[in-house]
Structure formats: C-alpha cells, structure tokens
Image: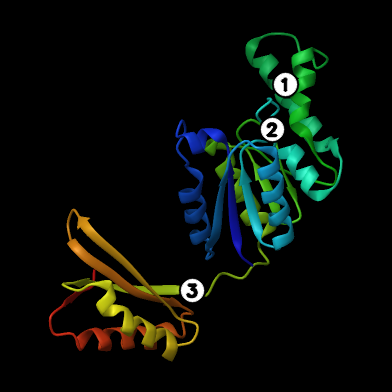
Amino acid sequence: MAFGLIIIGDEILSGRRQDKHMARVIEMLRERGHMLSWVRYIGDDRESITATLRDAFASGDIVFSCGGIGATPDDHTRQCAAAALGVPLALNPEARELILERIRDVAAEQGVPYEPERDDNVHRLNMGVFPQGARIIPNPYNKIPGFSVGTVHFVPGFPVMAHPMVAWVLDTQCGHVRPADVEERSVFVFGSMESTLTPLMLDIERDHPGIRVFSLPSVDHPVRGRHIELGVKGASGDLPAAFDALMAGLARFTDIKVRTE
C-alpha cells in the first residue's frame, strides 16, 4: 500500500508557518520500512479540501491529513471529510468523554469550577464532531482526539500533537502493511553533465526492469561543488546487478571522476 500526506492550512501556503510535517512523516515511515509516495498542500478552501479528501478516500492509500480539525471558523477538515464521504457529522461518544476530561483537567489546573455546560465548553465539544462512523486517534498531548475513516487519518496541525498521533496509527493500525522492499545506491560524479549520462541511465532501466535511475545535479554544493549524484533504486534483490552496471558504464568515461561516500 502507498502512503500519502495532506497538509492543510493557508498559513503554510502564505509562509506564516513552515511545514514541519513532511520531513518527520518521511522519517517515521522510514523507521518502519515504508516510504512516502505523495504529498499535497491545500489552503483553507472547502471545495479544494473536499475534492482532495474524496480522492484520498477513493485511492485506498494510507493517508495522513494534518490540520483543520479544530472548531474555529477557519477549520474545515471535519466538515469536508463528511462531505467527501457523503455521511453526516455526529458527536463521537469517545471523543466527547475525552474532551470533557480535558475540560475537567484544565479547570483543576486553574483552580476553577468544572462547568461543562458553560458556553465555551459546550463549543469545545465541536472538536469531537466527526463524520459518522469515524474512529478516534488518541492525542497524548491534550487528550483532544483526531479521527480515522477507513485508511485516511486526521490529526491536528500542531506538530507536537500530530507526530505522536501519526506514530500511534502506524504502530497500531498499519501492522498488516509489508515494509517496502526498496533500496538505493548512488555515487557522486564529477566532470560530467546529465545529458552525457542519459544514454547510460536509459540502458540500465531497459536492461534491469523494476529499477529506477535517479540523477540529482548540484551546481553549488558547499563541499563537493558542481557534481551529480547518480544512483539506482529498486528491490533489494535486483539492486546489486543494476549498480554494477552503473559503475561499469561510468568506467567507460575517461574524463570524469566517480566518488562514493
């Protein structure tokens, strides 16, 4: 199964906040033998969010959606998820109890009475209004849960909350997903251009089905200077032969230097 990531919020697209989700999700997936297949960034627009979530539900991928599940006017994710699924919103009983528990904890910390019927506390229950049939995702930071529907999992935009929640989903809901049997090996090539190396890359992909060649040029690396990182990616059993072919092909070029690190 593929893993996808949706990051929602005008603040990311405007630059008021920097995205901290993608790098950490890639890291968490790698730790468990998986890879991120795709990422989408979306602003706080209901039509765009609904369309993106509809695609996510239909994809069958394991998808994490970060942001927009609060209860302020610029939070639309819960409503858009329900619209994408064609189901009503409903207050999740488990979420209700967790939110009330959080309200009780805050009252105790502040030394004030516990008043769940107070208007602001009643409004907080909206954070537990999920698409009907959703499952909760525990939030170890402040107990306000996220939710899952099928293989799409919704967490807050705050990294301190979202990342432990993503890890919980990976460890408790994704044990059936086999780790990706994909490895890569590369070398640094100096004194050549991509156009010169392209025929070699095409030959390797032709002669080694299932192997993908990648080329990452750099013109101003602070240590290596101008160079190309050239490598192969694919199933671990197929990789050695493809890498050997890459090295043999590079050896035919007498005017370039190759270095591994």
Residue pictured at 27% horizontal, 84% vertical: 247
The amino acid on which the numbered mark 2 sits, given as a three-letter code, is Ile
> Looking at the figure, which quarter contains the C terminus?
bottom left
Sequence-wise first label, 3 or 1:
1
Colouring scheme applied when the structure was drawn: rainbow
Q: Nearer the viewer, residue 196 or 217?
A: 196
Q: Report which residue position mark 2 lands on.
A: 144
The amino acid marked with disc number 1 is Ile
Which picture quadrant has residue 142?
Answer: top right
Left or right of residue 243: residue 116: right
Count numbered badges in the picture.
3
Which of the pair 117/102 is nearer the observer?
117
Distance Cα–Cα, label 3 vs label 1: 46 Å
Residue at the image position 32 percent from the left and 84 percent from the top: 199
Q: What residue sits 46% from the left and 80% below the top?
A: 236
Q: Position of residue 215 (x, y in %)?
A: 34, 70
The 10 Å Cα crowd at callout 1, few under 14, some 14 to 19, many 20 or more, is: many
Q: Could you tell me which secondary element the residue under label 3 belongs to?
A: loop
In the rendered image, the vertical position of residue 184 relative to residue 75, given as above or below? below
Residue position marked by numbered label 3 in the rendering = 182
Residue 211 location, x and y as percent? 45, 81
The location of residue 65, given as percent across then percent down, is 63, 46
Q: Which residue is mark 1?
A: 103
